[in-house]
Amino acid sequence: MPELPEVETIKRTLSNSLTDKTIVKIDILRPSLIKFPLAEDFSQQITGEKIISLGRRGKYLSLNLASGAELVVHLRMTGRLIFTEQTEEKLPHTHIIMALDDGNELRYSDVRRFGCLWLLPPQAEDKVTGRAKLGPEPLSEQFNAEALLQILTGRKISIKQALLDQSVVAGLGNIYVDETLFAAGLLPMRCVSDLRREDFIRLAEVIPPILQSSIEHCGTTFSDYLDGQGNRGGNIAYLKVYGREGQPCPVCGTILKKQRVAGRSSVYCPVCQK
DNA sequence: ATAGACCTGTGC
DNA sequence: GCACAGGTCTAT
């Protein structure tokens, strides 16, 4: 479910509510979601910890704790992290409840249970699967056409697969890859090795504003995504191709096509994208 | 490279 | 029924 703009929105919508709050109690109803350490140790170590700040790297969200420990959450497809009053009715599939010292709760729910949580002790090595291999943050200085060119030159994969690869660029998923390929005028099935230098320049140009504008709209809600206060995102109205197969291209009016590329359904304009 | 695995829900 | 869903990992 959530890609970079949604995770960033969750971070922003939780920051004020969680900063300087202490986790006084944790209920883990689904220990299998905890990847490290064992759920029992996780509970013991997190209890009494104070949240000092929130962070994000790609699609990973982190709560930085006063001891130097870090709680890392990846929401995968249907994970939700919501700050709520204790009296509020629990969402279905609520698996973890953290009681805070202000009487409110931070709850993790996840229909499909693909999500993962880790608690890294202070100065621990990064045991968070995949995080160490992430490519540049697309909203940072490190991200540019050169970076894309460097990591992708000569590779015989589709540009769709390349942009979905978190080690190429961190945080894009199926929605924003389709949106950026439309904006760059590139077909998702185009082979990376056939792209020209200006294609990479174009990609590097269109990715940041697409993500930035989605963040301004609080992310894209199709069915599951909610921000940290339980609100839906408003970006769906601004999507040009994702979820719009069979509708006319917003630029040329040609009917948008859907095709499986790199194992994911991909929507594109057969005229504007080449 | 593609399929299958992990899960549940929804819509045809 | 079956296909499919904002993700990622493992196995042919």
Image (cartoon, coloured by chain):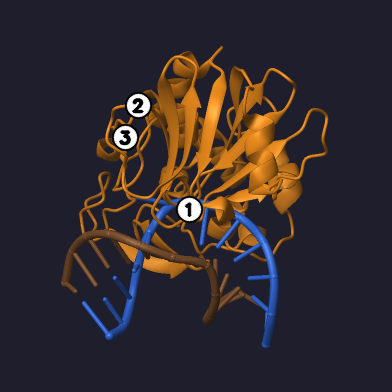
Chain colours: A orange, B brown, C blue
Where is residue A224 drawn, in percent x and y? 33, 46
State the count of labels: 3
In the structure shown, which secondary structural element does the residue marked by tag 1 occupy?
A: loop
Give, as a three-letter code, the residue at label 1: Leu
In the rendering, which numbered label is found on residue A86?
A: 2
Towards the viewer: A50 or B5: A50
Q: Disc 3 vs disc 2: Cβ atoms closer than 8 Å?
A: no
The answer to which of marks 3 and 2 sits earlier in the sequence is: 2
What residue did someone put label 1 on?
Answer: A186
In the structure shown, which secondary structural element does the residue marked by tag 2 occupy?
A: loop
Please indicate whether residue A264 sits to the left or right of residue A122 in the image. left
Quadrant for the C terminus of chain A, please: bottom left
The answer to which of marks 3 and 1 sits earlier in the sequence is: 1
Towards the viewer: A262 or A158: A262
At label 1, counting other C-alpha atoms closer than 10 Å, the crowd grade (few under 14, some 14-19, many 20 or more) is many
Q: From this viewpoint, is residue A168 visible?
A: no
Q: Residue at x 42, y 27 (%)?
A: A105
Q: Are marks 3 and 2 on the same chain?
A: yes
Q: Residue at x 68, y 37 (%)?
A: A119
Give, as a three-letter code, the residue at label 2: Gln
Can you say whether A254 is above or below A234 in the image?
below
Give, as a three-letter code, the residue at label 3: Asn
The answer to which of marks 1 and 2 sits earlier in the sequence is: 2
Q: Disc 3 vs disc 1: Cβ atoms closer than 8 Å?
A: no
Where is residue A9 drawn, in percent x and y? 44, 28
Q: Are marks 3 and 1 on the same chain?
A: yes
What residue did someone put label 3 on?
Answer: A235
The mark closer to the camera, 3 or 2, is: 2
